[in-house]
Amino acid sequence: MIKRKLLPEIESMLSRQAAVGLLGPRQVGKTTLALQIAESRPSIYLDLESPSDREKLAQAELYLPQHEDKLVILDEIQRAPDVFQVLRGLIDQGRRKGKGTGRYLVLGSASQDLLQQSSESLAGRIAYAELGGLTALEVEEDRLIQDRLWLRGGFPESFLAKAEASSVAWREDFIRTYLERDIPKLGPRIPSETLRRFWTMLAHHQGMMINGARLAAALGVSGQTIGRYLDLLTDLLLVRKLQPWRSNAGKRMVKSPKVYVRDSGMVHRLLGIDDTEALLGHPVVGASWEGFVIETLISAIHGYPEAYFYRTAAGAEIDLVLNLPGNRRWAIEIKRSLTPKVGKGFHHGCVDINPDARFIVYPGKERYPITANLEAINLCDLAREIDLVSRRA
């Protein structure tokens, strides 16, 4: 079993807060992590996709008080959003009895924004954390292992599959299950084939700003529908919209987000890339590596991540800008080359945003200065730096 970096953070949240929401896409390891936490204390686990467990919560205000001395784990909370109202009253009752922390751990396969309306009643009573796929810091730092993580993606069953064909088959099943079962359960009635084509188009345009009108014409739908599809995949934590940096009012700034399919293994399956040789020869290789790096670095941040890209009409461009705890700003360029170099656009962007540190991430091992204020660094080393800085703040 791979120890997840988020485990101590969830434990810490439970020691401070009555309820903790652990969010992430299906099959990413939320239940496994929750059951690890349950081993250390009296707990009860309810899967809200199970009819028998949902029936127990038909009268939640009567059932849950019977377990007020336990950590109650509620899996797939989006299946029973009405439970949030009950939790509010029980949490307030518990506080009056001196039992104000570590009461509930709720797991959801949707973003905090999607759950917002249901969870508004828990304002001030719940803290959220997001669990993504396995990251470079959670597996061995051996080059072959890291490349396997990039190729297969971070979903544990895909990464740990015994053979490449098994990993490919698992990812294909995952995609079909999401399209044919999981998304319809949330309410949207979208033809699975149409949504798969859209998801595949996003993989082809990995790391680009999306032309909604062009995608709409290709799919035969309206631009408004394209926006709805994109919001849905974003809410399901399958796609990331990396927002542009907008603080400099004196510049003509890009206003549209860059869009990434968050798991590199899903990018490769959607595009029919099943092995390393096919990946290295595919036009998406650079954008795939960029998305893989961005997800790794964002996951290393403790607390709410503030991540952006920077681009102006004049050509200034930075792949990733991180606002880290402690009021620190880092500018990061990403290159899939053993002899990385940055262009003038990066330097111009740094003049505009004045970062505290500048890095170029590359796939080599050695860390070395390129200029007086720019370092070349590998992915694991930079992720560790981010982890340490955000922990100390």
Image (tube, grey):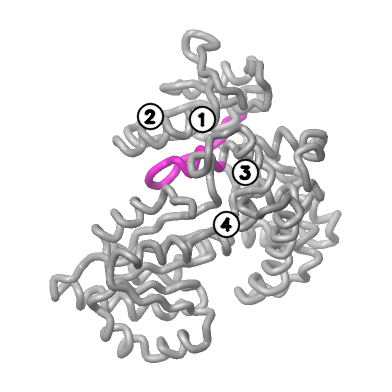
Q: Amino acid at mark 2?
A: Arg
First in residue order: circle 1 vs circle 4: 4
Please report the bounds of the magenta region as a residue range: 295-311
Task: Tell me the residue at 75%/43% (across/down).
Answer: 205
Q: Name the residue carrying label 4.
A: 237
First in residue order: circle 3 vs circle 4: 3
* Along the viewing direction, whichever of 389 and 342 lies nearer the viewer: 389
Can residue 213 be seen here? The reply is no
Q: CA distance from mark 2 to mark 3?
A: 29 Å
Circle 4 packing at 10 Å, graded few (<14), some (14-19), many (20+), is: many
Looking at this rendering, what residue extends furthest in the top direction? Answer: 372
First in residue order: circle 2 vs circle 3: 3
Point out which mark residue 328 bears.
2
The answer to whether the residues at label 2 and label 1 have Cβ atoms under 8 Å apart is no
Number of labels in the image equals 4
Task: Tell me the residue at 39%/58% (across/down).
Answer: 128
Circle 1 packing at 10 Å, graded few (<14), some (14-19), many (20+), is: few
Per the image, label 3 sits on a secondary structure element best described as helix
First in residue order: circle 2 vs circle 1: 1
Task: Tell me the residue at 44%/21% (across/down).
Answer: 357
Circle 3 packing at 10 Å, graded few (<14), some (14-19), many (20+), is: many
Q: Quadrant of the C terminus?
A: top left
Q: Give percent across and percent down for residue 43.
A: 32, 73
Q: Amino acid at mark 3?
A: Leu
Q: Is residue 342 left or right of residue 118?
A: right
